[in-house]
Image: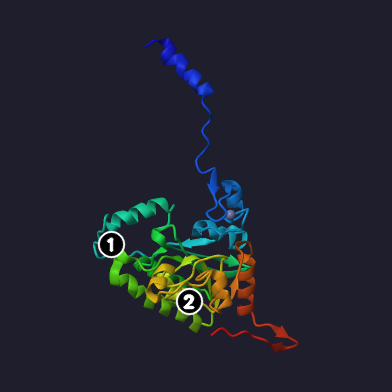
Amino acid sequence: MNWLTNFVRPKLRALVARKEAPENLWLKCPKCEQMLFTRDWEANQEVCTHCGHHMRQRPLKRLPRLFDDGKYELHPLPRVTADPLKFRDTKRYDARLKEAQAKAEGTTDALVVASGLMGARMTVIAALDFGFMGGSMGTAVGEGLVMAADLAVARKAPLIVFSASGGARMQEGILSLMQLTRTTIAVRRVKEAGLPYIVVLTDPTTGGVSASFAMLGDVHLAEPGAIIGFAGQRVIQDTIRQELPEGFQRSEYLLEHGMVDAVVHRHKLRETLVRMVTLLMDPLVVEGRSLAVTVR
Ligand SMILES: [Zn+2]
């Protein structure tokens, strides 16, 4: 050891070494496999700049693009018993939860509830987060949706839900299945108050969520190419022993078959939602005659 190895060599190494590219500078589109510059992709609302493929977007990335001037208030989810069944598979459920919470930047479960102005009208949005344990619905998500519905009724605001889920949260067993009825009743309260309930189906919307509040909208919009269904394609194929048609369970297929009202590009979502809510909330008065659209 001398000054050459201790001092000169590191200096030379630092000079010669290529500066390491920051992580996540590029990403690959899962559809067209083009390399995308992350900053361009984010500016394009996480839609592939080559082929238009809509990648899964987490609620905190989505919300600023929907509310006026990107301003909104987040409503923390009601506190629930964290691990009611003390469930354990290869890992303890409460450990899995903590891990997901640590990665979720401030959100506590797979649902984010926010309120704010959209087209100058108070609106409540509840968005599921597929990045949080596959957007699975347990007690916290159920409670959160009930809270969002109550908030909409209290503020006489429309409720917009963004769905993205693999289904019920297995680690909560029967308690997660109970959320199907609870969320259905919550949505019904919004409808009984005469307020619009709009669902935006995003990739993927499956299982218990598609069997409850995600399919009860007054209007169903869907993002392009999203998988929407109850059971997975392979399960159905193995059960009925038949080849399924091309594009089965995709947004466009569901639009053709009347399950979805419109497939809307992510760039057009905000303006479409604002227009829709205005149509549903404001009675149109033409020459003294009311052309009110009644939401029931
Ligand atoms: Zn692409």
Q: Could you tell me which residue is drawn at 53 percent across and 28 percent down? A: 18
Ligand 1 occupies quarter: bottom right
Name which residue type carries label 2. Answer: Met
97, above or below 169, in the image: above
Classify the position of the N terminus by image quarter. Answer: top left
Count up the numbered dots.
2
Q: Where residue 85 sits: x, y (%)?
A: 24, 65
Q: Where residue 175 sits: x, y (%)?
A: 30, 71
- The residue most toward the right is 287
> Is residue 208 in view from this perspective?
no
Q: Where residue 208 sits: x, y (%)?
A: 39, 72
285, above or below 248, in the image: below
Query: Colour mode?
Result: rainbow
- The residue most toward the front is 242
Q: Of 156 and 225, which appears nearest the observer?
A: 225
Residue identified by numbered label 2: 215
Q: Is mark 1 within 8 Å of ligand 1?
A: no
Name which residue type carries label 1. Answer: Asp
Q: Could you tell me which residue is drawn at 33 percent across and 54 percent down? A: 98
Q: Within 10 angstroms of label 1, few (less than 14), some, or many (20 or more) residues? A: some
Q: Of 57 and 26, which appears nearest the observer?
A: 26
Q: Is residue 4 left or right of residue 272?
A: left
Q: Of 205 and 3, which appears nearest the observer?
A: 205
Q: Element type at marker 1?
A: loop
Q: Could you tell me which residue is drawn at 53 percent across and 36 percent down? A: 21
In the figure, residue 258 lies in which quadrant?
Answer: bottom right
Q: Within 10 angstroms of label 2, few (less than 14), some, or many (20 or more) residues? A: many
Q: Where residue 187 sits: x, y (%)?
A: 46, 78
1 or 2: tag closer to the N-terminus = 1
Label disc, if present, on residue 83 of the rendered structure:
1
